[in-house]
Image: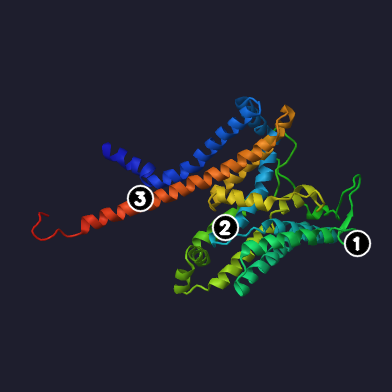
Amino acid sequence: MSREKSTFADRLLGRVSPTGLLSLAAPLVAIVFAALITMVILTIIGAPPLDTLVSMAEYAIRPRSIVLTLNAATYFYLSALAVAIGFRMNLFNIGVDGQYRLAALTAAAVGGAVTLPAPLHVALIIFVAVLVGAGWAAIAGLLKVRRGVSEVISTIMLNAIATSVGFWLLNKERFAVEVAGSNNIGTKPIGPSGQVPGLAIISGTQTKVFGLIILSIAMGVLYHVVINRTRFGFDLRATGRSESAAVASGVNVKRMILISMILSGGVAGLVGMPQLLGASYSYSLDFPTGLGFTGIAIALLGRNHPVGIAFGALLWAFLDTSAGILQLQKISPDIVTIMQGTIVLSVIIAYELVHRYQISAEQRRVSRQLASTTPAKEGTPA
């Protein structure tokens, strides 16, 4: 009986190392710490901290709020995946914001200009978005491999250029038309054949979940398979950890950098698709912005792992959605921004502490092994 119990315990806990448990506990501790910091700030400004957090949670679990959380998490997840591809290659693609906005604008213009059968229409719009996002990111990749320009600098500059190009294209003389009933302008609306219907999977509300949440999930699975189950993924991770070692093993580092930037940009092109094809059906001046920078935070929060990124995206969307109740209570919704920033900072610090502990533990383990295998000196008892 004791043997069966030990076998079950080994299956349940024996596969998880102490450092693995610490890695799992790190984000939870960081979230709790961020909640405590938020409570302190709420106390300072004179708001009841516990009641405020409870009201945020109660508001966020309403049926409509759950749908809004899932919808926001859909494009947050895609944005974080685009950033994570670069991170796994040790590349910092800050240009996701410009890549997805330029891709969404171009795809919306193409989608509004053509009429095709539904599957082909949707596929064309998504293909254009991926192509534009990949092409815009390829500029930074080429600058890095040909001229050694840091991708951090080039992608920041390309964000600014993409914004200017977007304003130039979103003009009545080019892609834009007036939006009926408002002073807003946008691309010609995409017809019904190019729209992706929502999913009524949450009862108690008429608001639907983006149909492209399925695409978001599929991209997470594809990311995991490519990174962890293919030769290309191995080369990518190896190059990200040590370029010299990758070169010694025959990897073309410049080629990997360019391909990684193109893949990152291609995924970035998908970020605006759930909103464009599931709600807006047009790219206008009020199209969501800043999703690329949010993706950086979520990728860090999820440690570039598809499951970790999913939890990070849901948490971020949950906080964004729950901020809606604060204005009714005359509390600044900036409290949510403070909490999000504190979570990211706390998680980074927690992971760094875990990393240092892992290095120290490995050094102690190697020292013990060396001590146990070192032969005893002559004349001393073994």
Question: Is disc 3 surrounded by few (<14), some (14 to 19) or many (20+) residues within 10 Å?
Answer: few
- Residue 292, relative to residue 323: is it above or below? below
- Nearer-the-camera pick, 206 or 14: 14
Image side of residue 20 versus residue 54, left or right: left
Q: Amino acid at mark 3?
A: Ala
Residue 196 can be seen, yes or no: no
Q: For residue 194, what is the image quadrant?
A: bottom right
Residue 187 in percent (x, y) is at 84, 56
- Residue for badge 2: 223
Q: Amino acid at mark 2?
A: Tyr
Residue 114 in percent (x, y) is at 84, 61
Of circles 2 and 1, the one toward us is: 1
Q: Describe the element under mark 1 as helix, strand or loop.
A: loop
Whether label 2 touches label 1, CB < 8 Å: no
Among the two numbered marks 1 and 3 on one chain, the one whose residue lies closer to the N terminus: 1
Of circles 3 and 2, the one toward us is: 3
